Image (cartoon, grey):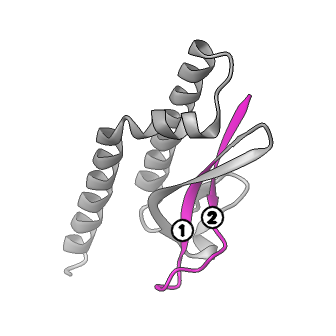
Amino acid sequence: MSSIKTILRKKKLSNGKYPISLRVTKDRKSKFFSTPFESNLNEWDSKLGRFNKKHTLQLKSNRLLGKIEDRALEVISELEMNHDFYSLNDFERNLERNQILKLQIYFHFGKSKLMNLKKQGG
């Protein structure tokens, strides 16, 4: 049985924000996968694993985090149905097979950031 959760990593980035990662745990071992998101401490709800209302793109960002989690759960389901045993490395390989989704998420996130900047006059 595996579990997933989006978390705010504790290592601060050079811009003062913290990266958001997807943590996948299986057999008491965890592996972290990066997401295109970063946040200030006051913009993150640790219990929910989601951005709170203080984050400027809360709804869109939370929807994209949900899509990332959904894809991870799909990969876990596929592995559990097709294999008696699988490792976190198997999970990573299967997740990476769908690079198109990852690129789409980055593109969508960048596009929404650009539109937000244009609205603000930047």
Residue at the image point whose x is 49% and y is 68% from the top: 38
Q: What residue type is labelled 2?
A: Leu
Amino acid found under the numbered disc labelled 1: Pro
| 20 inside magenta stretch | yes
> For the residue labelled by badge 2, is the local secondary structure a helix, a strand or a loop?
strand
Front-lying residue, 79 or 59: 79
Q: Please say whether residue 35 is visible from this viewpoint.
A: yes
Tell me if residue 53 can be seen.
no
Judge by depth and name the residue closer to the eye, 108 or 73: 73
Marking on residue 68: none
Res 8 label: 2
Magenta region, residue range: 1-23
Relative to 13, is 98 on the left or the right?
A: left
Secondary structure found at label 1 = strand
Residue 41 figure quarter: bottom right
For residue 19, the mark is: 1
